[in-house]
Structure formats: C-alpha cells, structure tokens
Image (cartoon, rainbow, N blue to C red):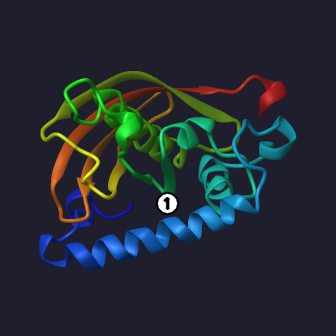
Amino acid sequence: MATSLHAATPDPADAAATLARWLDDEAAVHQRLAGGPGPGVARPDQVAGLTGLQLMQGMLDGSLPYAQIARTLDFTIVEVGAGRAVFQGQPGAQHLNPLGTVHGGWFATLLDSALGCAVHTMLPAGRAYTTAELGINLVKAITPKVARVRAIGQVVHCGRQLATAEARLVGADGTLYAHATTTCLVFDLPPSRA
C-alpha cells in the first residue's frame, strides 16, 4: 500500500520548494490533459476490461476523459497509485462564500474526489463504487491567498461490498485545512458497462 497520509504531508520548512513542485506537477498534468479527449464521461468501450487503477491512470495521462467538475471548480488529479489518489486545487474568488472564505462545498468536492478515486484504484475490472457516507471536518479557513491545496486520499479498507478511505486537505506549507472519511458501496457493473 502507498505511504500514509501523514508521511505525504508537506514539510513547513520546504513550503516554497513544495509549492514550486506542485505547480510543476500541475502544469505537466494540464499539458497531458490538453492533448486528450477533455472533460466528459468515458464510453463503455474505452473502459472495458480496465481495473480502477488503470482507469484512473488513463484519466491522469490524458487518454481517457476526466470529470467536468474538475474544470468547473479549478482542481485536477495529480497522482494515483494503488489505494491512493491526490487532487490539487486552486482556490479562487469564484469559490468564496459570503464571508470571504472558500465555501465548504469546495473543500468537500476535493476531498470526496480524492476519497472516491483512491477507492476506485483498488477495484478490479467490472467493479464500481458509489459514496454512501462522507464525513468532513473543516479545521481552518481557506482564502484565495492560498496558492494551492492538495486533497490526499488513502484507502483504509477495501472489501467485496464496502470500502473506507480517509483524506487530508493540506497546503504546501503543511497547513491542515480539513480531513475527511468515506464509506463507499462496492458493486458489479451491469454487463453492458463492464
């Protein structure tokens, strides 16, 4: 299994270097995505026989469509591995609530994406998931002054019918903005979609 969530948390002493690396990662992903099919939903023939990890890798390398919500809310997948998914977001003025901080729904969407996609990486071909429960703790406000945040999702358990995962939303300086857990239902895809 991949590294723990805590091992993936940035070191505050290396904030500038971490942010520079994150921006480089983001630019490389955006370049790959620009050459691919763009946002949308993959056709059944595009994903037939792919494991969840292969599907997520296809989204990351630009060979499969990525979710439109990522473009809408200014975030992108930047890393996937077995039991792990990392999304990077750019908080902006369009994400603010009336109090001038980033809306909790933006936090929730990034965390839900990292959690669900981490679970997806553990599924064999012909299996899928849906979120059954999502719990989020917002521990610090985000403003557009925060250049980027990462939602780092890690699977805790993946069984035949249920999977659980946890995630942290962190800044390049190591600041924890939120943490979350999920329970996902795991099921067989209908034969026409497998």
Provide the residue designation for mark 1.
Answer: 78
User: x, y percentage for residue 91?
Assistant: 35, 46
| Residue placed most toward the observer, 187 or 42 | 42
Establish if 137 lies above or below 21.
Answer: above
| Residue placed most toward the observer, 126 or 41 | 41
Left or right, 90 with reference to 161: left
Q: Tell me the residue at 32%/70% (across/down).
A: 19
Neighbour tally class for label 1: few under 14, some 14-19, many 20 plus, Cα within 10 Å: many
Whether residue 81 appears in this view of the structure is no
Q: Tell me the residue at 39%/69% (across/down).
A: 22
Q: Tell me the residue at 19%/27% (across/down).
A: 99
Q: Amino acid at mark 1?
A: Val
Establish if 68 lies above or below 144.
Answer: above
Left or right, 118 with reference to 41: left
Could you say which quadrant of the image residue 104 lies in?
top left
Tell me the element at label 1. strand
| Residue placed most toward the observer, 17 or 78 | 17
User: x, y percentage for residue 153?
Assistant: 36, 48
Left or right, 139 with reference to 161: left
Q: Quadrant of the C terminus?
A: top right
Total marks placed: 1
Whether residue 41 appears in this view of the structure is yes
| Residue placed most toward the observer, 75 or 117 | 75
User: x, y percentage for residue 34?
Assistant: 71, 60
Q: Quadrant of the N terminus?
A: bottom left
Q: Tell me the residue at 18%/34% (across/down).
A: 138
User: x, y percentage for residue 162?
Assistant: 43, 28
